[in-house]
Image (cartoon, rainbow, N blue to C red):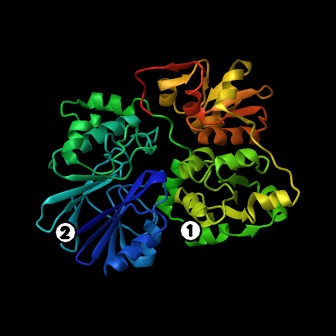
Amino acid sequence: MKIEQIYTGCLSQGAYYIESAGEVAIIDPLREVDNYINKASDDGARIKYIFETHFHADFVSGHVTLAKKTGAKIIYGPNANPSFEAKIAVDNEVFQLGDITITALHTPGHTMESTTYLLKDKEGKDHALFTGDTLFLGDVGRPDLAQKAADITQEDLAGILFDSLRTKIMPLSDDLIVYPAHGAGSACGKNMMKETVDTLGNQKKMNYALRADMTKDEFITEVTDGLLAPPQYFPLNVKMNKEGYEDISDVISRGSHGLTPDAFEAAANETNAIVLDVRNQDEFVKSHIPRSIFIGIDGGFAPWVGALIADVKQPILLVVPEGRLEEVITRLSRVGFDNTLGYLKGGINAWIASGKETDFIDSISAEKYNEIICEYPTFDVRKQGEYDSAHVEGAELTPLDNLNEHLAEFPKEDKFFIHCAGGYRSVIASSILKSRWYHSVINVEGGMAAIKNTNVSVVETTCSKSL
C-alpha cells in the first residue's frame, strides 16, 4: 500500500494518491492530471477511483478530465448532484482497492454532500482518514459556503457539522492518520495548523472544535465567530466542479497565443480584457502598461486572482516573465480563470521598444516614509489579525481581500501612503487603485517589516485575533 500526499502550496491544498496491488485511487485531484497518470504508469497500476470529498469552492478539481483520460469512476457522497456521470455513494459504502478498502462516511456540515473516506489496510484495520474540508488540522470547515438563506442558515450547518464530527469521526481510533484537503492559508477555514498530516488523537487534544466537553451551542458559536465573507469566485468554482469544464490543454493552447504590442493593445480594447502583469513586484513598480493589474506569480497568485478579479469568465491578457507562460495559465485555470486570450510577446521590453506609454508606482523606502509620514494618511492592506497585532499609529485598515468594495475610502485627488507586511500586497493594491484613477497612491517598500526598523510609531498588542 502506498499513500502519497501531493500538496500545492499556493492553494494550501492536498490531493492524495493511493495505490494497492496495482489499483489506484485519487482523492481531490488538481485540474492538471498528467502527474497522477504518470505515477500510476510508473507503479504499473491503473487508476480505478476518483474520490471527491465535496464540491470544492476554492479550486477546480481534475475529476472530470481524469475520468475521461483513464476511465476511472468518480465517487461522491450522498446528496451530490453532478451534471456528469458519477457514482453517488451511500453512507458507509465500501470500495475495494487492491488489498485495501475505502469506506465513504457521510459527514455533512461544511457542505451537505461532504464525505470523508476511511482507509482500512489489508488486515482490515483503520489506517487513515481523508477528511476533505470537514476536519482540518486545528480547525473545521467553515459552515457558510453551502448556505441557502431561504432553506438553511450557517448556524444550522454548523450544528450538522457538530453531529458529523461527534458521530462519525471522533469515535474513531486515536492512532488514525488524518489527511485534510487544506492547510494554513486556505480561505476554507480560520485557524489551520501549518502541518498537513496528524493523528486523530492529537487533533482531539489540539483542535478547539473537537473538545470532548463542548456543547453544540458552544461549537456553533465558536465555528461561526469571525468568519469573513468568502471570496466571490467560490460559487463559480463550485458550479464548474458540479457541471464540468473545458480541458486544461485547450485552455493552455488558447492562452499561449503571442501578441505584438499593437495586437495586444487592440485585443485589450476590443474585449475589455484585464491586463494582468505577473512579474516581480519591483519590476512592475518601475515600469508597466498603464491600468494593468499586478498579481505576482511568486506570491499567493491564484487565490488573489480569485479574490480580486472574481469573475472567472473575465477576459485576461498576460504580461509574464520569460519561460513561465504555461505555469501562469495553469495556475489561473486551477481557480477557474480559463478566459486567457494571449500574452504580450517580448514582454514589457517589446512594449517599451514600440514607443507605447508606460506607467510606474510612486514608491518610497520605509526610512523616507518615516520622514514624511505626517504629510498624508496611511492605509494598511493587511488582514484584520495582522493589523490588530501591530499597526502604524493612525493607519486605516482596508484589507486587500475586499479592496474593491472600499475604493471610496481612499482619497481620489490627495496623496496617501499604502503598505502591507512585506511589499507584495501593497503593490497589488496600488495597481488596482491606479487602474481606477487613484493616481496619488504612494507605496511603502518593504511594508511593516521595514517600517518596524524605523522610528515610526507602531501600536502593538500582546493578543491578536486569528488571521
Neighbour tally class for label 1: few under 14, some 14-19, many 20 plus, Cα within 10 Å: few
Answer with the quarter of the image where residue 268 lies. Answer: bottom right
| Circle 1 SS class | loop
Amino acid, disc 1? Glu
Q: In this view, does 160 lie to the left or right of 247?
A: left
Inspect this view and state whether residue 166 appears.
no
Residue 147 vs 320, above or below: the answer is: above
Q: Is residue 417 left or right of residue 86?
A: right
Q: In this view, does 202 lie to the left or right of 330?
A: left
Residue farthest right in this picture: 355
Q: Name the residue under label 2.
A: 100
Q: Name the residue under label 1.
A: 246
In which quadrant of the rendered image does the N terminus lie?
bottom left
Residue 125 vs 169, above or below: the answer is: below
In which quadrant of the rendered image does the C terminus lie?
top left
- Residue 104: percent from left, percent from top: 25, 59
Q: In this view, does 427 lie to the left or right of 362?
A: left
Neighbour tally class for label 2: few under 14, some 14-19, many 20 plus, Cα within 10 Å: many
Sequence-first tag of 2 and 1: 2
Alpha carbon separation for disc pair 2 and 1: 34 Å
Residue depicted at x 26% and y 44%: 164
- Residue 250: percent from left, percent from top: 60, 72
Q: Nearer the viewer, mark 2 or mark 1?
A: 2
Residue depicted at x 78% and y 29%: 412
Whether residues under marks 2 and 1 lie with C-beta atoms below 8 angstroms apart, the answer is: no
- Residue 37: percent from left, percent from top: 40, 75
Answer with the quarter of the image where residue 192 lies. Answer: top left
Residue farthest bottom in this picture: 44
| Circle 2 SS class | strand
Amino acid, disc 2? Ile
